[in-house]
Image (cartoon, rainbow, N blue to C red):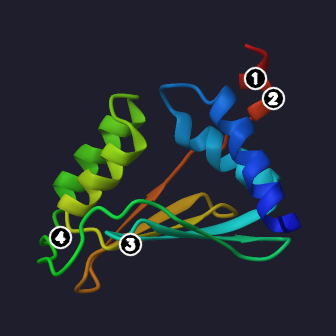
Amino acid sequence: MSNAIENLVEAQKFAMRYRPKVGGFPFLAEVLRQAGVTKNFWSLPSCQSIFVTRFGPVVNQGTPLTTGVSDVPPFNEEALVRALRKDQAGESTFPEFLKASWDAGIVGYEVDFESRKVTYRGANDESYVEAFAAVTPGAIVRT
């Protein structure tokens, strides 16, 4: 296992162990940022995720949301925002969030850990950008 993979996996394990149910993404993002992850690119519906880290890039191939030939759902910002708010409230799992994002016409998204922004993209260059809060993982872990 490379240093890049080992570092990423350990950061993810830590984040998942201490992540709060509500508002968990900013916690996860800060743990990854502190571990040297600068960007994360998701491709839907394949659920391929590329992490750009200080030790090198790492790819994680998840379980695809669809197989074969499929129509891409139309970009629907309102549906995406509903999926985001549901996830932020701790009312969905990550796989449910990915499926809801795909159903909202999202074909990929980019997380910029330094600027704390996520850009969601549709197939026809539509986009929706959302900032996320800075958190202090140590403070959350001690509570």
* Quadrant of the snapshot with the N terminus: bottom right
Q: Are marks 4 and 1 in contact (CB under 8 Å)?
A: no
Element type at mark 3:
strand
Gap between marks 1 and 2 measured at Cα? 5 Å
Q: CA distance from mark 4 to mark 3?
A: 11 Å
Q: What's the mark number on residue 75?
A: 4
- Find out whether the residues at labels 1 and 2 contact each other: C-beta distance under 8 Å: yes
11 relative position to 101: left or right: right
Q: Amino acid at mark 1?
A: Val
Q: Which residue is mark 1?
A: 141
At 67% from the left and 29% from the top, the residue drawn is 17
Task: Give the structural element (helix, strand or loop) at label 4.
Answer: loop
Q: Residue furthest bottom?
A: 124
Q: Nearer the viewer, mark 4 or mark 3?
A: 3
Q: Position of residue 85 (x, y in %)?
A: 32, 39
Tell me the residue at 38%/37% (across/down): 93
Q: Quadrant of residue 59?
A: bottom right
Q: CA distance from mark 4 to mark 1?
A: 37 Å
Label 4 close to label 2 by CB (< 8 Å): no
